[in-house]
């Protein structure tokens, strides 16, 4: 029979002299672990007679309780001592330089959209937005693109399944930002001066076409608006955007269902070190489509075309970015490659302003 009093004395001494948490844990296992001395005593109670258990039980349980509480008290002591040691020895060196935080960049598409908003704001244009999932009427019908018109096939539209139709309207991923302008005309009184930048979708994919790309369109609706307003606005915009005074425009007759007459805008370029740069007139590059808003479109939006006239224009934001900042592969815009973004991206704090330089 183990002498309980001796065991108690030994265990208390071991607990007292344990000077690390690891040493204390070893004492705990030796006493209360599966093979521990106190656990072994507890097991003997099963084989005792009721009388024996009545006298030995409280002694053995008392031993377990006193060992358990001594272990807990010592653990707290050791932890406090460890904390005090760290507080006494560890110091925060406030003079150390902070570790460098990786910094992201503004994507060229966002940068160019901000530049465009800044330039057009100076001419009194507000930025308008609308849904990317559109109904057939806003994306096509209101724009004088009827059911049978080849433009609907031409656009290579992403159609939603028929059971997603709303009010009998087929739903599509918008193929241009024109529906934003339609929504503005049907909900606001003229005069209207807006730009609508945003994502658009066409079922198209190769080196120069991605299924999602960015477009900006502009719309002016007022009384007595004519082609002269269109030409001045686009010339002023292109000079500000390319930050050159020698930007030369060429207006070419064209066709869009939503404008009449329709005008393609070419911009002159020069060749510098084998690369085309905007400015001069060594060659011509198509940069914008535009025209006077078709009277059927004005009518479809609930306005009287004999009172209200307007012009509209549209172009690709990704293409505008490539022309100004010299990227040559559109696909890289959407790869999310951090090396490309570090090279072509912009500092978040360099907000474009007309006075500071829109593309500075
Ligand atoms: C292009 C040409 C264009 C428009 C967009 C428009 C919008 C309304 C009414 C009339 Cl609501 N027109 N937008 C007009 C002419 C051309 O875009 O090449 N886009 C990439």
Image (tube, grey):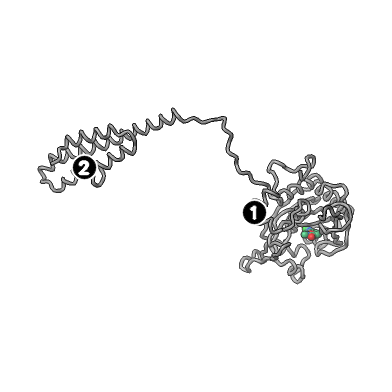
- From the viewer's perspective, tell me whether residue 216 is left or right of residue 334: right
| The N terminus - image quarter | top left
Q: What residue would you read off at disc 2?
A: 37
- Classed neighbour count for the residue bearing mark 1: other residues with Cα under 10 Å, few (<14), some (14–19), many (≥20): few
Q: Quadrant of ligand 1?
A: bottom right
- Rendering coords of residue 128 (x, y %): 73, 51
Note whether ligand 1 is within 8 Å of mark 2.
no
- Residue 351 in sight in this render: yes
Which residue ends up furthest to the front in the rendered image? Answer: 273
**Which of pointers 2 and 1 lies earlier in the amino acid sequence?**
2
- Rendering coords of residue 314 (x, y %): 79, 57
Which residue ends up furthest to the bottom in the rendered image? Answer: 148
- Rendering coords of residue 161 (x, y %): 63, 68
Residue at 76% in and 43% down: 360
Q: Nearer the viewer, residue 307 or 246?
A: 246
Q: Nearer the viewer, residue 138 or 250?
A: 250
Residue at 29% in and 36% down: 71
Q: Tag 1's secondary structure? A: loop
Which residue ends up furthest to the top in the rendered image? Answer: 88
- From the viewer's perspective, tell me whether residue 280 is left or right of residue 320: right
Give the image quarter of residue 205.
bottom right
Q: Nearer the viewer, residue 125 or 111?
A: 111
- Classed neighbour count for the residue bearing mark 2: other residues with Cα under 10 Å, few (<14), some (14–19), many (≥20): some
- From the viewer's perspective, tell me whether residue 48 is left or right of residue 32: left
Q: What residue would you read off at disc 1?
A: 337
CA–CA distance in space, label 2 to label 1: 64 Å
Residue at 84% in and 65% down: 255
- Rendering coords of residue 6 (x, y %): 17, 35
Q: Are marks 2 and 1 in contact (CB under 8 Å)?
A: no
Q: Nearer the viewer, residue 199 or 321?
A: 321
């Amino acid at each position: 029979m183990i002498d309980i009093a001796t065991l108690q004395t030994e265990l208390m001494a071991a607990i007292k002299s344990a000077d690390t948490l690891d040493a204390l844990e070893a004492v705990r296992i030796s006493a209360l672990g599966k093979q521990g001395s106190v656990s072994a005593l507890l097991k003997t109670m099963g084989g005792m007679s009721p009388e024996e258990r009545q006298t030995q039980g409280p002694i053995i349980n008392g031993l377990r309780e006193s060992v358990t509480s001594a272990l807990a008290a010592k653990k707290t002591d050791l932890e406090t001592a460890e904390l005090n040691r760290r507080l006494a020895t560890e110091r925060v060196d406030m003079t150390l330089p902070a570790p460098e935080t990786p910094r992201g960049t503004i994507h060229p598409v966002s940068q160019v959209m901000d530049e465009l908003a800044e330039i057009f704001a100076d001419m009194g244009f507000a930025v308008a937005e609308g849904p990317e999932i559109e109904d057939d009427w806003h994306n096509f019908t209101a724009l004088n693109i009827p059911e049978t018109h080849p433009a609907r096939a031409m656009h290579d539209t992403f159609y939603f399944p028929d059971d997603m139709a709303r009010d009998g309207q087929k739903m599509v991923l918008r193929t241009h930002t024109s529906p934003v302008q339609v929504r503005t005309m049907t909900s606001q009184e003229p005069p209207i001066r807006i730009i609508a930048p945003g994502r658009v979708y066409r079922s198209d994919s190769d080196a120069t076409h991605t299924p999602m790309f960015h477009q900006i369109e502009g719309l002016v609706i007022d009384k007595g608006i004519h082609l002269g307003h269109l030409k001045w606005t686009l010339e002023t915009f292109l000079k500000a955007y390319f930050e050159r005074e020698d930007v030369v425009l060429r207006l070419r007759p064209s066709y869009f269902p939503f404008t009449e007459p329709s005008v393609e805008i070419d911009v002159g370029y020069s060749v510098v070190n084998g690369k085309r740069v905007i400015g001069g007139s060594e060659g011509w590059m198509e940069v914008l489509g535009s025209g006077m808003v078709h009277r059927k479109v004005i009518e479809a939006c609930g306005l009287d075309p004999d009172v209200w006239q307007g012009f509209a224009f549209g172009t690709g934001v990704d293409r505008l970015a490539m022309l100004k900042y010299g990227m040559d592969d559109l696909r890289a815009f959407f790869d999310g490659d951090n090396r490309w973004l570090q090279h072509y991206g912009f500092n978040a704090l360099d907000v474009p302003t007309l006075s500071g330089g829109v593309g500075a």
